[in-house]
Structure formats: C-alpha cells, structure tokens
Amino acid sequence: MAKFTVLDQAEEDKLHATRLLGIEERPFKRLSKRLLAPTTPIHTFLSRPSPSEEGGTENETETESTEQFLQDIQRFREDVILDFAAFESSIARIQLLRAANERERERYAAERLKIEVTAAEVRENTAKLRVQLDEAQKTLAIRKTYDVLADKITRNPALKPRDEQHVNIEKLKAEIEELEREAQEHTQAWLERREQLAKVVYEGQKLRRLIRDEKEPEKDDTEHDEDHDHLLGGVSGGIGRDGLSNAGTPRPVDDASTPLAAARGSGVGTPGGATPRPDRDEDVDMDAGPGLETGDGNKNGPANVVIDKPGDDMDTS
C-alpha cells in the first residue's frame, strides 16, 4: 500500500486548478447516486422473490406489484434522463469554460509580450531621460552661476539701466551713420575739387602755351584720358604702392615745369611786386638811361632792362 505523502506546492496548485468545483460535480454525484442507490427500482426488481404457482389472491397481489414496478421504472427512467441532461449540460459548460480559459491564456501571453516590450521601451526612455536630466541639471547650475554674476553686474550703481544703454546704443548707431554719410559727402566733394583742380591745371598749361606762343601738342583721346587720370592723381580708385590709396595725394605733372620756371619770361609779376629775372633769349637794352633797375639791383650803373617779347603779352581784350 502506497504511503501518503505531502504534495509539493506546484503539484498542489495544479491539483487545485484541475479539480472540479462543487457546482460542477453536483450533476455527476446526483446521477451516480440515482443509479447506484439501493432503493432504485432495479435493485428492488432483482431482490423480488420468484413467483409461486399458488393461485387466487397471490396472483392479484403480484399483478398489482408489477404495475407499481412498471410505474416506478417509468418514473426512474424520466429522472435518469433529466439527470443525464443536467450532466451533459454541465460537461458542455465545463468544455466551454476550458476553451474560454485557453483563449484567455493566449491573450494574456500576447499581452504579456506587449507589456514586456513596453516595459523595455520605458526602461530605455527612462535611461535617456535620466541622461537629459543630468545635462539639464548641469545647464541649470551654469545658468544659476550666470544669474549670480549678472545680478552682481546689474546691482552695480555705476552701471546704467538696460533701457538707457539701448537708447545710447541707438544714438551711437545714428551718429555712426551720420559720420559715414558725411565721410561719403566729403569724399565726393574732394573728388569734385580734385577734378576742378585738374581742370585749372590743364587750363593753366593751356594759358601758358598761349602766352609763350607755343604749339599745343596733338594727343589722341586715349592719351588725353591718361593725362587726365594722371592729373587727378588716381582718384577713381587708384591704389599706390604698399596697398595704400592714392586719393587725396597731390602729384607733380610730368610736362609741367616748376612754378619759378613757368613764371620766367612770362611777364607775370610775383605777389611781392619783384621783377622777374630775364631769360637768355630776352633782349636787353644796353643803352638804357640811369635810374632803371638793372639785373643785379644797381640803379646807378648800366641797366639791364627786361623787355618782354610781343608774344608774351596777355590778351586781355
């Protein structure tokens, strides 16, 4: 005979999971009780004595007992049919519950997988958020440090308010724009003056040639433009050596002589009223009388009188 042993926890849980409940095993117990009970018509029929050959009253009694037995059998049959129907419905109910439980277990397994995937994503997201939190905390600490420094700066009584500083900045910007505009205007005026100066120099050279009765050299348009640019001193964007601008720098004219050389023999007096020295090609009257100024400044000796040529006289008409 096998000895009774205590079941493990897993086997006990399995037994509890597979056992029938009271409401589920009730139809089976009722059916087994009805079929195996000693008071059933089947047992009564089997325990009945065999019929005797005596006649009369015993036959009538046996007939009545037979009819009663048939009625009991009919009633027993109906009860058994009802019990089997209840047992069948109980079995169908158990099968439906089992199928539903299997479907629920499958659904629970699928949901478990989804929950595990979601939990893994949540863990990864939590790790990322933790890293972002650390960075945000570092940024917050830096900003707090900046706030402390900014608070110290803004509380300095020597500093002006931000609005006033903005107003001053706008004023400075307006002044810078005004200065830039004035610089452009001065540059334009300087260019115009240099052009006028170049024209004056050119007209002066032309006038000198007219006074000296010199022939004006023939130049084509290209050479004239080059001379004009040369007189302007490279104002139109010319850059001198060392990468510096040549604008505003006066330049000597190549074909123009020095002011003293240009004034010699031209008959034009100096601002101080002194008489220019005679050139070698000018005529000198050696028989001039006394009192005339000589070339060496002696009034009593023989005077060297400067006589201008007719071609040197300026036409003032």
Image: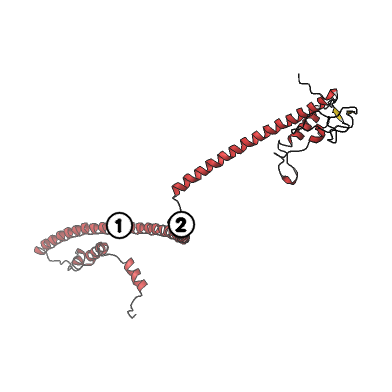
Q: Which of 161 and 2 is in front in this view?
A: 161
Taking 179 as reference, is 8 above or below it?
below
2 or 1: tag closer to the N-terminus = 1
- Secondary structure category for the residue under label 2: helix
- Secondary structure category for the residue under label 1: helix
Instruction: Look at the image and tell me in which quarter the N terminus lies.
Output: bottom left
Please identify the quarter of the rendering in which residue 271 is found.
top right
Please identify the quarter of the rendering in which residue 43 is found.
bottom left
| Amino acid type assigned to the residue bearing label 1 in the image | Arg
Judging by the rendered image, the residue that carries numbered circle 1 is 93
- Residue 36: give x, y in percent of width and height: 23, 67
Seen at 79% across and 35% down, the residue is 259
| Amino acid type assigned to the residue bearing label 2 in the image | Ile
Give the total number of marks visible in the rendering. 2
Q: Say whether residue 46 is left or right of residue 214.
A: left
Could one spot residue 117 in this view of the protein? no
Instruction: Look at the image and tell me in which quarter the C terminus lies.
Output: top right
Q: Which of 241 and 56 is in front in this view?
A: 241
Taking 302 as reference, is 83 above or below it?
below
- Farthest residue in the top direction? 317
Judging by the rendered image, the residue that carries numbered circle 2 is 153
- Residue 223: give x, y in percent of width and height: 81, 30
Could one spot residue 201 in this view of the protein? yes
